[in-house]
Amino acid sequence: MKRKKFIRKATPYFFISPWIIGFLVFTIGPLILSLIMSFFDWPLTTEPVFRGFGNYIEMFTKDAQFWKSLRISLKYAAIFVPLNMGIALFLAMLITQPVRGVKVFRTIFYIPAVISGVAVSIIWGWILNGDYGALNYLLSLIGIEGPRWLVDPAWALFAVILASAFGVGTMMLIFYTNIKSIPITVYEAASLDGASPARQFFSITLPIITPTILFNLITSIIGSFQQVTLVMLLTGGGPLKSTYFYGLYTYNNAFKHHKLGYASANAWVMFIIILILTALVFKSSSTWVFYEAEAKKENKKRRGGKK
């Protein structure tokens, strides 16, 4: 009897055991190892030497590139995150409209999200080319001489931001799913009261989707600090290291300069920065995120109090 009870309880864990093993081996294991490595001088070919907090001290006091790369990544995140979310929300609102062929546009808008980073880099390399790029050609049609996007330090970062905003399909679908879940009767009632489409968006749609905005905001912040592939293939960190992102800086320390211990310390600093930013977003969410279930509970309490 006890054996059967044990088997019944253990069966679910048996089915999810591949995921648990994979999580322990490929996520938790490397995470713990990288923390250990961050306290060592760990070259690729020779024996590691314990340094204690030496890697962290060197990073904050002697490595000027650390601060430059961090500043570039913060600037990128400050522009990319609101731009990315704004475009995704705008497209999500477009594909919720009851117009003919909307399913085709939904597919077109989502396709860039499933294209590999290498393919996206090649496409945007052609578009942003200063000599024969499509973007500069379109600008020339209206009498504007386009800049040399990828080789001008003043424009390279904005070129990477523009290319990064191309893959908003997944975020768009998340917004779309939440918007479509809002009962149509709410909008019909607002229309009868004389609310304009803009008023309905700011008074109904936006408050209801704030939990989704919170989720997309956090994932965008994390993604912006981990950007490596696109910038590596588009600019390689140039020109003059104007796009030398923190993720690329960490990657080069590990696999170009073979300083695995130092790169691990870089990665943990990135983790702490993302953790702090995420905590600040969560802390502020109590003032602007609306949860419908909590609102219903609050209304029930108020009604109970009145009785």
Image: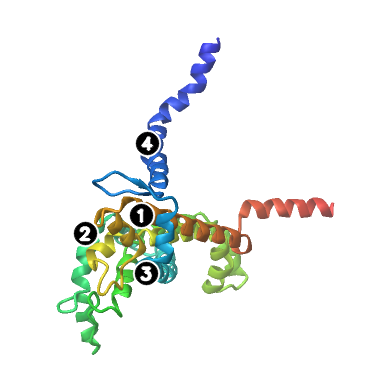
Amino acid type for the residue under numbered disc 1: Tyr
In the drawing, does residue 240 fall left or right of residue 10?
left
In the picture of the structure, the residue carrying the numbered disc 2 is 119
Task: Please report contact status of discs 1 and 4: CB closer than 8 Å, yes or no.
Answer: no
- Look at the numbered disc 3 and give the secondary structure of its residue: helix
The disc, 3 or 1, on the residue closer to the chain's N-terminal end is 3
Q: Residue at x 25, y 45 (%)?
A: 46
Task: Please report contact status of discs 3 and 1: CB closer than 8 Å, yes or no.
Answer: no
- Look at the numbered disc 1 and give the secondary structure of its residue: helix
Q: Where residue 65 appears, x then y in whole percent?
A: 35, 68
Q: Residue at x 42, y 31 (%)?
A: 16
- The front one of 222 and 205 is 222
Task: Please report contact status of discs 3 and 2: CB closer than 8 Å, yes or no.
Answer: no
- Which mark is on residue 25? 4
- The front one of 271 and 214 is 271
The disc, 1 or 2, on the residue closer to the chain's N-terminal end is 2
Q: Where residue 145 appears, x then y in whole percent?
A: 23, 87
Residue 226 sits above or below residue 238 on the image: above
Q: Residue at x 21, y 59 (%)?
A: 119
Task: Please report contact status of discs 1 and 2: CB closer than 8 Å, yes or no.
Answer: no
Residue 13 sits above or below residue 286 on the image: above
- Look at the numbered disc 2 and give the secondary structure of its residue: helix
In the picture of the structure, the residue carrying the numbered disc 1 is 262
Q: Where residue 200 appears, x then y in whole percent?
A: 55, 69
Q: Nearer the viewer, mark 1 or mark 4?
A: 1
- The front one of 239 and 307 is 239
In the picture of the structure, the residue carrying the numbered disc 3 is 64
